[in-house]
Structures are given as structure tokens and as C-alpha cells.
Image: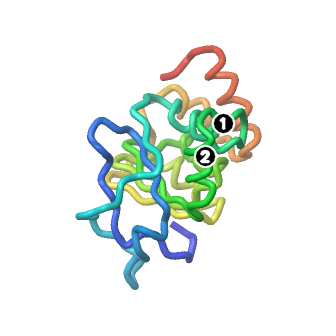
Amino acid sequence: MSDRAAGPSSIPPLPEGATMALWPLAVLGPAGEDGEAGEARDAPPPLYCSRGKWLHPLFDLLGLLSVDGPAADSDERAALASAGELFLRDRVIGRAAAFLILRAGIRHAWADLVSDGAFEVFEAAGARLGGGERVPAIGCQTEALLLGVGDPDAAWTLLVERRAAGRSS
């Protein structure tokens, strides 16, 4: 975690059944002096959450933010746009998810399981990533596909092609 900007003081739990959620960073409070965050007790409800699998929640978020597609819900998009800096909480963040999270403009994230590749991508971008458990790689073909890919645009092209082909493992 190379970014010097403070992350949240607490990590909110995912809502029941959710695989990913977003909060305004400001409502979670700044991290302590050591930069570490504790578990949130009374986190506010997220601005956005998803129950999707694979990278679909992040592709949906990119569409909602109109980064790479039409927005489906203008009220939800407006809430996200006006929230300021966002904090993303996920179950798993591998290298592919890291590229998509950063593409969405999110520079603070935390997951239960995080790969070394995800940390590399966040570190290269000067962004903050934390996790409950760090592993060398996520057991996923998409993680292997992006091994050694450092260019965000090249990663984006590979991920869009993989999604279009319907290979989500």
C-alpha cells in the first residue's frame, strides 16, 4: 500500500449476500496514524452493492459510472458521482479486479482475499489496497491471463475480450 493518502478508519462489512459494495471514503473516517483500519461496527449503508460473480460487478459499476458504457440508473450514478472519493469492499480482488477498480477511479479498496498481482497493480498506481488474506494468485484463469500485464489499457482489452467470449472463471 504505497499511497500516502489515508484510507478509512474502519472496514465496513459487506451487506448480507453482497459480493461487492461502495461507500464514500469520507463517511468511513480516516485511518489511524499507523494507516491501519479496524472493523466497522455501525457502517452506513453502501451507495452501491452487487451480488454478482466474477468481474461482472466491476463491469456493471464501470457502466454505471459511464466510464465505458451507458448508465442504467441515473439516480444511482448521480449519488456515486457526488460522493467524492470512494472506498470499495469486495470478497476477492485479483489482478484483473485491481485493473477494473482503478479504471473506475477508485483508489482505496479492501477484500477478504487479495492476490500479490492485485497488490502490484495498486502499488504501481499509487493506490491503497488492503486485505484479510494475501495469496500469491487467485485460482482463476483470468488471473493467469493477466500475469505479467502491467499496462492498464492492454489489461482492459484482454478483459473485455474475455467477457465477450463468456469465459468468466
Q: Is residue 136 above or below residue 122?
A: above
Q: Is residue 131 left or right of residue 125?
A: left
Residue sticking out furthest to the left: 41
Q: Are marks 1 and 2 in contact (CB under 8 Å)?
A: yes
Residue at point 62%, 22% (across, down): 163
Q: Is residue 18 above or below residue 44?
A: above
**In the foreground, 164 or 96:** 164
Residue at point 49%, 75% (across, down): 6
Amino acid beneath label 1: Ala
**In the foreground, 77 or 99:** 77
Q: Earlier in the sequence, mark 1 or mark 2?
A: 1
Residue receiving disc 1:
71
Residue at point 29%, 69% (across, down): 38
Q: Secondary structure at mark 2?
A: helix
Residue at point 61%, 46% (across, down): 77
Q: Is residue 112 left or right of residue 6?
A: left
Residue sticking out furthest to the front: 75
Residue receiving disc 2:
77
Residue 124's x, y, as percent?
Answer: 65, 59
Q: Secondary structure at mark 1?
A: loop
Query: Mark on residue 102?
Result: none
Q: Residues within 10 Å of mark 1 (few under 14, many from 20)?
A: some
Amino acid beneath label 2: Arg
Q: Is residue 105 left or right of residue 54?
A: right
Residue 141's x, y, as percent?
Answer: 51, 26
Residue sticking out furthest to the top: 165
**In the foreground, 138 or 86:** 86
